[in-house]
Amino acid sequence: MFDIDRKNGIPIYIQVKDKIMEQIKNGTLKVGTKMPPERELAKEIGTSRNTVSSAYKVLEQEGVLVSYQGKGTFVAEEIKTWKQYTAKDKLFKIIDLALEEAFEIGFDSKEFLNLVEERTKEKEEYLKYIKVVFFECNIEQAREFAKELEDATKLSIYPAVILKLEMNDAETLKQVNESKFVITPFNHVNTVKSLIANFQKEVLGVAINPCLEAIVKIARYPAQTRFGLFCISEEFQFKIINALESAGLDNLNIEATTSREIENVQKIIDNSDVLIVSPGRYDEVEKCANTVINSKYRGKKDIISFDYSLDQDSVKMIISKIIEIKDIK
């Protein structure tokens, strides 16, 4: 189907994604074409099924591919990246339609503009008072994503860990009870729904993406490079390793730890050429990596911050969902 360049430093799943997009654009893969099963394509190009699965998932999130249970994965009927109009053009069309309707029922352009401004202010004011709980499997990412969502939406968001729900933690249950919505990554939606079923809260899913820049940096190091991985939680540690394996980097020499004991941290730093750190441990590890201990200088090491970010289209969908709320006070 296509060839993969294993020496250019670009993660394999990104190459697979780009090659599929290229074949769609040049007409090799047409709208409605059934894609090869993940296992079959992986065998054909000489990579793992997880790598192909990651490429397919990204293309599904972008609206390029669509999967049907029991049928397979197909080139989507409508690919959003090819839509004729930009987001701004689409918004202009919506405004034009609304303006036409306003004229028909007797409003002039100034009255229309005043109503739009009034409604926008009402919605913005309402958002300030909506409480939301964001659930993740580890507090590290829960805090990062809650902060990112707060900045993007101006909502009040409480970061929480799914384990606390399973333990019936009083404070976590209180926060859920007082919330308007619950948000969690798509892979946790069903779990969270079942755990808070008695609260009758709507659970919104959000997509998260690993830091592509970090993956590319890691991929460009020589095969013999020794990596030290530092995270706060084992769950986040697992996510990073899984993301690297999905990108085709499944043979890395990694020594990982969640320990905060200075001796353990320094030992791994000394034994590593490159340090991979979660955002919550960057300052701590950087300080240890550049400290003089027992007259031995621990020379500067490359430090790569590995984090995840919220998919911006998912964030927009959440904002849109909240804007639909009718009970503005």
Image (cartoon, rainbow, N blue to C red):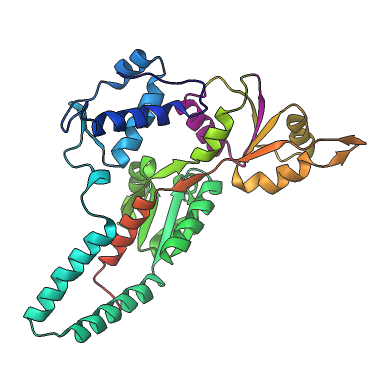
| Residue at image coords 38%, 42% | 188
Q: For the magenta stretch, what is the residue range?
A: 224-249
Residue 243, compared with residue 203, is above or below; it is above
Query: Which residue lies at the image location 57% right of the left edge and 34% below the top edge?
Result: 217
Relative to residue 109, is residue 251 drawn left or right? Answer: right
Image label count: 0
- Answer above or below: position of 223 versus 280: above
Q: Is residue 40 above or below residue 33?
A: above
Q: Residue at x 49, y 38 (%)?
A: 212
Residue 68 visible from this viewpoint: no
Q: Is residue 243 magenta?
A: yes
The C terminus sits in image quarter:
bottom left
Quarter of the image for residue 225 reads top right
Q: Position of residue 178 (x, y in %)?
A: 40, 65
* Viewer-nearest residue: 181 or 38: 38
Is residue 312 covered in magenta? no
Kindly tell me whether residue 122 is visible in this rendering.
yes
Q: Quadrant of the N terminus?
A: top left
The residue located at (31%, 75%) in the rendering is: 120
- Taking the image as shown, residue 20 lies to the left or right of residue 249, namely left
Give above or below for 324 relative to 170.
below
- Furthest-right residue in view? 295
Residue 87 spot, x, y in % from top left: 28, 57
Residue 55 placement, left or right of 261 = left
Image x and y of residue 20, in percent: 30, 29
